[in-house]
Amino acid sequence: MHLVTLDLEGVLIPEIWIALAELTGVEELKRTTRDEPDYDALMRYRLEILEREQIRLSAVQEAVASLSPLPGAAAFLRWLRSRTRVILLSDTFHQFAHPLMAQLDHPTLFCHELVIDPDGRIRDYRLRQPDQKRRAVLRFQDLGFRVAAAGDSYNDVSMLETAERAVLFRPPERLAAERPDWPVARDHAELRAALEDFLGPADST
């Protein structure tokens, strides 16, 4: 039995924080996990900027409403879900990602949660659990699944290292150079090709 875990932002949808930066004009918000491997440091940096600029949840939701899945992502995900089980493991937040899930036909998503004040200020964030991507893959393996994983950023590395098959999707050049053992897919057709031999015949169990 097999199962595929995918990152969300940068693999299936655009980066939400970059969309927010473009909406608000705050260039500092373009920093993502492709630039900063320490997720907590990145989120503390973002929270400080949101507080300084008085950016509320409504602005983030406006940015999200402007987004669509990456070209080819919806068709790729439909194909993958027709072949096997698919779980999205993301370091985004429920309050951000929910509207986009309808455009992807509501796949299963494990992500985190924001702490929101009554006035819409984003005060903090709560992890589902530390290093949730790696831990989720380990639990799936405990259940007898062979896991293939695809991600684009440094926060995906522990998930990719733990899976039986790892694929980088449009990664930063530095990350690709650090892990030459992982194939790189530049579009969803290449990502499909990188997973097909792992999946083998359609799995109906």
Image (cartoon, rainbow, N blue to C red):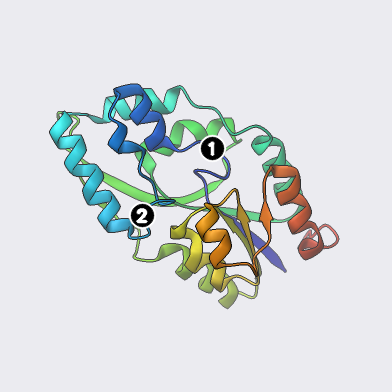
Please identify the quarter of the rendering in which residue 86 is found: bottom right
In the image, residue 60 sits, relative to residue 126, either above or below, namely above
Left or right of 73, for residue 112: left
x%, y% of residue 173? Answer: 54, 54
In the image, residue 41 sits, relative to residue 16, either above or below, namely below
Residue under the point 59% across and 74% down: 141
In this view of the protein, can residue 123 be seen by the observer?
Answer: no
Q: Residue tagged by mark 1?
A: 13
x%, y% of residue 131? Answer: 39, 66
Report the amino acid beneath label 1: Ile
Left or right of 187, for residue 120: left
Q: Are marks 1 and 2 in contact (CB under 8 Å)?
A: no
Query: Which of the two discs, 1 and 2, labels the residue nearer the N terminus?
Result: 1
Determine whether the residue tagged by mark 1 lies in a helix, strand or loop.
loop
Q: Residue tagged by mark 2?
A: 36
x%, y% of residue 52? Answer: 13, 34
Residue under the point 33% across and 57% down: 39
